[in-house]
Amino acid sequence: MERCRMVFSGSGGQGVITAAIVLAEAAVLHEGLMAVQSQAYGPEARGGATRSDIIIADETINFPKVLQPNVLVCLTQEAYNKFYTIIRPGGTLITDTRYVKTQRKADALQKEIPMFETVMDTIGKPIVFNICMLGTLLAITEIIQPDSVMKVLETRIPSGFLDMNREALGLGMQLGAKYK
Amino acid sequence: MERCRMVFSGSGGQGVITAAIVLAEAAVLHEGLMAVQSQAYGPEARGGATRSDIIIADETINFPKVLQPNVLVCLTQEAYNKFYTIIRPGGTLITDTRYVKTQRKADALQKEIPMFETVMDTIGKPIVFNICMLGTLLAITEIIQPDSVMKVLETRIPSGFLDMNREALGLGMQLGAKYK
Amino acid sequence: MAIKDYIRERFFPHLWCPGCGHGIVMNGMLHAIEKLGMSRNEIVMVSGIGCSSRISCYVDFHTLHTIHGRALAFATGVKLGLPELNVIVPMGDGDALAIGGNHFIHAARRNIDITAIVMNNRVYGMTGGQFSPLSGYGTKATTAPYKNIDHDFDIAQLAMAAGASFVARTTAYHVKQMTDIIRKAILHEGFSVVEILTQCPTYFGRKNKLGDAAEMMEWFKDFTTPIGSKAKKENDDLIERGIFVQKEIPEYCEEYDKIIEHAMKGS
Amino acid sequence: MAIKDYIRERFFPHLWCPGCGHGIVMNGMLHAIEKLGMSRNEIVMVSGIGCSSRISCYVDFHTLHTIHGRALAFATGVKLGLPELNVIVPMGDGDALAIGGNHFIHAARRNIDITAIVMNNRVYGMTGGQFSPLSGYGTKATTAPYKNIDHDFDIAQLAMAAGASFVARTTAYHVKQMTDIIRKAILHEGFSVVEILTQCPTYFGRKNKLGDAAEMMEWFKDFTTPIGSKAKKENDDLIERGIFVQKEIPEYCEEYDKIIEHAMKGS
Amino acid sequence: MDKNIRFIQGNEVCVEGALYAGLDFFAGYPITPSTEIAEHLSSRLPRKGGKFIQMEDEIASMCAIIGASLTGKKVMTATSGPGFSLKQEALGYAIMTEIPCVIVNVQRGGPSTGLPTSVAQGDVMQARWGTHGDHAMIVLTASNHQDVFAITVEAFNLAETYRTPVVLLFDEVVGHMREKLVIPEPGVIPLVERLHTSVKDGVDYHPYLPREDGRLPMSDFGGVHRYNVTGLFHDMWGFPSSKPEIVQGLHRHLVDKIRNNVNQIMRYKEYYLDDAECVLISYGSSARSALHVVEQRRPRGERLGLLELQTLWPFPYQMIKDKCKHAKYVLVVEMNAGQVLRAVKRAVGDPERVFLANRVDGVFITPTDIRNILRIIMGKGA
Amino acid sequence: MDKNIRFIQGNEVCVEGALYAGLDFFAGYPITPSTEIAEHLSSRLPRKGGKFIQMEDEIASMCAIIGASLTGKKVMTATSGPGFSLKQEALGYAIMTEIPCVIVNVQRGGPSTGLPTSVAQGDVMQARWGTHGDHAMIVLTASNHQDVFAITVEAFNLAETYRTPVVLLFDEVVGHMREKLVIPEPGVIPLVERLHTSVKDGVDYHPYLPREDGRLPMSDFGGVHRYNVTGLFHDMWGFPSSKPEIVQGLHRHLVDKIRNNVNQIMRYKEYYLDDAECVLISYGSSARSALHVVEQRRPRGERLGLLELQTLWPFPYQMIKDKCKHAKYVLVVEMNAGQVLRAVKRAVGDPERVFLANRVDGVFITPTDIRNILRIIMGKGA
Amino acid sequence: MAKPKLKEHRINREWCKGCGICVHFCPKSVLELDEMDKVVAARPEDCICCKLCELRCPDLAIEIITAEKE
Amino acid sequence: MAKPKLKEHRINREWCKGCGICVHFCPKSVLELDEMDKVVAARPEDCICCKLCELRCPDLAIEIITAEKE
Ligand SMILES: Cc1ncc(C[n+]2csc(CCOP(=O)(O)OP(=O)(O)O)c2C)c(N)n1
Ligand SMILES: Cc1ncc(C[n+]2csc(CCOP(=O)(O)OP(=O)(O)O)c2C)c(N)n1
Ligand code: SF4
Ligand code: SF4
Ligand code: SF4
Ligand code: SF4
Ligand code: SF4
Ligand code: SF4
Ligand SMILES: [Mg+2]
Ligand SMILES: [Mg+2]
């Protein structure tokens, strides 16, 4: 496979870091791939835009940071404003329509997707927004199987919440398929 | 003048360190000489034999310690036992008859002098034993003037005690003259 | 001067989480200073490291943001260096009483004229929610996943036993009392300690299922009572609020001035 | 076993000055241990640095002579490492309450089963007579040539405020009481503090013109009184002797064992 | 899915390594970016009957692990910059008393509070020289999770073998990033256990008399041998002594037991060194960027190689000299002002061919940063 | 008798020097062999209206002097080994915040409690590298009372000039011995006073913006300029920043202000170097033994010379290289395992001609010790 | 002292973090969070100018501006 | 308990530092310092075996050896 470099960005409460970890962990544990995940710490991360870097590849990853992501996800305006310039030319930029108004500048496939809206309309719980985002991403990039993500979620989430997460992931997959 | 290296030794309460400082200070402040004084610190010094090194010379003194003293004063048996071997061949070894029983071994002029006894008989105060010792030493070595020592004592001792100290110094001078 | 004149507006909005009690303490402190009509140049604020300690960046005084736990030692140098300055030391519970406990009791013992304001959120906020010496037996924290077996200090008791001449406690809910007590503490000549229970909804609240900031403040309302109240006698679990001690004993810098006077005469 | 069997005779006579009260404390401690009939292998003595701390070289237990002020932190490691050991920590007033004050209050707060014996001679003996946090206002010392303006701690008050579950005070004069209290302190399960006023004739005595060792001990006789005595009511300057507090509260190592039990079940 | 495969942060890897090595006792005080080590251990240790204690500060933490080590426990503490500075006095005590323990310093930007959440490698010299008085130190590091695991186990092994504190010097990137770790089955990495004395009860035991092979058997507190432990210079029974011959003997012993075993202690990895014209020397997370450059450039025919140091102290001067013998250029890649650079210069002999690619602004050093320097030194223009 | 002549201990000479330099504020905690400094100052400072405070420990002492310095005072603390280790975190704070202060370390035998009352020079490397994170340090020393006085004054001058902590690294022999001191009249040694900003009230003052000449004017707490002081990386107003360019700028500044001024900071003395075949390099009390040997052997035609270092850090590499250019042998004389030796080896370039005469057993190094080594290296047989 | 009369709830929307403390504790339920989680004075007419909202705001984001009633 | 009968004042002259504490506090003035400043039992017949000297000696230099009286 080709090395995939991703950046997930958003605000503290949106669970972008969890999504990043789940994705990378799924790749490593259930698909035999290599992955590195890292994230911004520090006071800036508390108030402003959180960021997590993920690299997935089928061989050793040395340099662990993402300078120019193939895939950039921005879930807040602030995150978008801060990061949209780093997208790798020709990469995929995924934004959420509820939170982000894009400026058509990046040399990238820009996908504005109503993920939040869909989650709220269908499930009604903002807490699975990040999992829906993961589903969307998986549908678009096909980087790993959604099943692998579900296996990770099974070890992390109280069983009572699993169905809701599965639903959110599926919702994302459907959305992603539309915007592919 | 020739460089004079001295070691005063005894037990904590006997004032050998004070005597050493007074002597060296007198040489520096009142006779224009150079002097270095140092002493042993540490737990050993608390219980056992105290030691102070003095070097007096008319030129810069670099190495500040005394390895082989020209003049060694021992005021306790323990001090004598510990230090008598370091005397410079041909040097002067002064001991107090009350406290020290010498073994005739050192290649030195051994002077066993009843300093303590004389002080107690004449003045009756053990506190000036060390000053009497200084007087004895000055008479034997003639290294500096007793007046210079008195000048130092004047700055260090409450005036009420000066006479007693002067007397002890004189007593020592007389004793020293006898044993010269 | 208005409250806004005492702050460095360019650093706002500040870094504290939504609903963090530290902001309420800052608010109350500024109101107290405003009431005292103090000028910004006569106040030095010395802080350590922690969420609470970040306050020194936000207020427009002479500000000294030091190292974790040592603020009172720095403050002692500032105060003794220039006793005419008003030295205020806002501290976190960890800062003041974990790593900084020794400086705390010694500043109290010396009775040096410094105002220590302990922002007690019962957790290490800055480092992400570990238990502190104030968390209390049975609470949870990132380093107490089963439950905390460390007993907690009673800050007021400790300060009094160490010798502090002004000791008080209030909460982020009781803002009027807070302002009033801080004002008195600043006026007091000697070491003054004001413990203020504040909420850290992000860590202490979440880990211990205490709800949001407002709910944590409700707790302060419900589980505290004025010193010596009847309610306290009926329910010893209630935490007392108010001024525990306020007494005149020789202040360190003044005593030192006497030493100088004496020494200068002597020499 | 006889007292002599508890010591390392080859290091005697010891290094302490003639009449130093630290020797009396050692004597009393050995008598207490002898009465308890403890074996030498079940005792660990942990000390810091100071004249008082040198005691660990003289007694034939497992002995850990550490660094200045930190003995209780080392002792905490030893105790939690092997809770079945009896850990005794003799400390100087400087060691325990100047540099070591924080470890002192935190060990008290945790209520870990360690016996801290504070040999309070009100001075830094080892370094040659500087004032300590126990010297007291108005005393003299090599670093207080005019007079000391530092107030002193009340060790017992501080220990209690910090959470110690056994707190007592006695003096080098009251040797029978001393032995008895040390025995009880060792038996107590939890953090116990025994403050023992001891004389340093070499520095504190000389600088403050208090006479020789015996005269300093006379002072202990004359200026102390049993806790709550009538004499105390009449003369508040008297220092109280006896056991201030002795209570059962959860001990740290036992609590930790419960955590282990719980965690092992959970996993 | 293999249950031994984990996807975790470097700090947690360190925890796994320590537990694998037999860690029983941890004392610490939270500080970014090392805190996760304490957090994980607070939950993991009691599950295996071990002890976790959060002390009042870093000094107390260091003291507590030394105390616990004397009861026969394998012990560790973890901190970063400011806390590591605070531990220096007690660290010296562990050196002097020869008590096995492991100290983790997950470095952050310094000096002082510096940049608590950014990456830096500025504590290399401090780890060697931070405490007062002559002494020797073992300081280890690693750049990826599998190595962090192995080197953590190694740290415990070396601590036991040489009866000495061992410092694990990680950095924020290694500590915080997540990647794959395969936990080896028990027994795969050999463990060095506490060497207990075979001296029987009633026979004189010398806690400070090295055996023929240089090792010093211990006896746990509570056992049949009562001895003394002191930070003063001491004789073979552990009692204070200021006799010059004893002082000198102990001083020598403390320094030589490390210095003379540099070949046993030395851990490193090499990549493409055989024919390397330019040897990159790096360690910790910066070695990842260095390796990235090497692997990227090799296919283009550039004869780059990487020597990744895992033992920083004792510094493997001779090994480095040998490895760099045929190199035209040596490029040290690190995130400080050149702390390993100076040792490498000393090692290679002719400092003129040694260069530095570094970064000191809190930003992780990139392959581009390294390539830029390479371009300059290899004369391809700035 | 000249009232300016004194016969006192080296520690008291340091007190006299500090008072001459304008010391106003001292905070300390007793420790052998530095305690006399505190003791004398407790009596001397209040006589001139200055302040002496005995804090609860060494950490608090270091913090207190930093606080007092910000009120415009000239400040000092004094300690030895263990206390110096404890001060490292706060020392780093003074470096980061650029606050002038003087720290005396009267060295004793180490590591750990070591030999509290014996002589050693084992803290040379620690003085340079003891705190975490990259930084630079000024470390001075002297071997006799007249120089101890002068170098103490110099320490205050350099602290003010470079807005930095300065370490005075003495040793037990220098600290405790008594010899003659002639106190210069006021004005004979020039003093550098606190440079106050000339920026007026209401105008933006930048506490961390160096002037053209590199100096940073200060404004005392309580004055008209309110600014922030923090141990975090910070901008020119003193407010925290993690912007890479600001971090890098401050990092550079902290290191370069010292490193680029090595020639201004360098103090040394030379004896008979002009034609020296063998250059002895020494410092502190061991330089006295070295000088003894040189002066004793010169009359016999042996071409010995002595280079006595007074500035230990920043290390004067170039100067040493120059001075040793024509020397056949270089012999470093020190009381540690060779800490200055390693820097000298680096300085002279060809380490083969550099030798060590040392002593690490708590005994003061003697002329005989040095002569024994000389005999060996000069090929006269062991 | 004259009873203060409300002139304005001065709200700094940039600074307000929507914690809801002022809303929760307002004795007259004057305040509400809007859909952007910023505070607004929904029922200003009920305000009794007790200023508790101002005093309790951790973000200094709300100020009660009064005109003194004669 | 049987009343103890004195057998011996066992004094370790090597350890005794002549501080005089035992002498000062002996209720029966049994003890004295000799000319070498070491303690001696000058009036052993007066000794009531209270052992206070033994307990108060900082140097463990004096021990009261008793034979239990029947
Ligand atoms: C020497 C040192 N140790 C540890 C830390 C890490 N640290 C920073 S703040 C803090 C505790 C914060 O808790 P508290 O003082 O209660 O303040 P809060 O954040 O809760 O307001 C810790 C442990 C540090 N900066 N320096
Ligand atoms: C870190 C450190 N600071 C200071 C010292 C010096 N020091 C040794 S013992 C001591 C104080 C001793 O006083 P105290 O604890 O009261 O014991 P005492 O000698 O009076 O029994 C001091 C300051 C030290 N050894 N280590
Ligand atoms: S973590 Fe807690 S203490 Fe820190 S800012 Fe957030 S709420 Fe406040
Ligand atoms: S100096 Fe004081 S405390 Fe130390 S041994 Fe002597 S009398 Fe005891
Ligand atoms: S001033 Fe009082 S009544 Fe008015 S909005 Fe604020 S809290 Fe409510
Ligand atoms: S209290 Fe302040 S920050 Fe919170 S909602 Fe009200 S105005 Fe906004
Ligand atoms: S046992 Fe009692 S009576 Fe007898 S000598 Fe001792 S103190 Fe005196
Ligand atoms: S108390 Fe002990 S040391 Fe003192 S005089 Fe009596 S026997 Fe000797
Ligand atoms: Mg807190
Ligand atoms: Mg004491």
Image (tube, coloured by chain):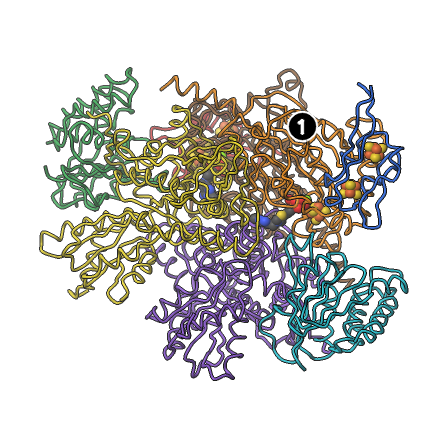
Chain colours: A cyan, B green, C orange, D brown, E purple, F yellow, G blue, H red
Left or right for F232, reference F365: right
Instruction: Residue A17: name its quadrant.
Output: bottom right
Q: Is residue H6 visible?
A: no
Disc 1 on helix, strand or loop?
helix
Which quadrant is home to the C terminus of chain D? Answer: bottom right
Judge by depth and name the residue closer to the eye, F70 or H42.
F70
Residue at numbered disc 1: C34
Instruction: Residue B100: name its quadrant.
Output: top left
Tag count in the figure?
1
| Residue D138: percent from left, percent from top | 49, 22
Instruction: Note whether ligand 5 is within 8 Å of mark 1.
Output: no
Judge by depth and name the residue closer to the eye, G31 or F231.
G31
Left or right for F193, reference B131: right
Q: Is residue E233 above or below residue B128?
A: below
Three-letter code for the amino acid on which mark 1 is drawn: Glu
Please name the residue shown 28% across and 56% down the image: F358
Left or right for F119, reference D208: left
| Residue E339: percent from left, percent from top | 43, 61
Q: Is residue B50 visible?
A: yes
Please name the residue shown 39% across and 44% down the image: F162
| Residue B48: percent from left, percent from top | 34, 40
Judge by depth and name the residue closer to the eye, F161 or H32.
F161
Q: Is residue C113 above or below residue F287?
A: above
| Residue D76: percent from left, percent from top | 61, 49
Host chain of mark 1: C
Left or right for H40, reference C214: left
Disc 1: CA contacts within 10 A as few (<14), some (14-19) or many (>=20): some
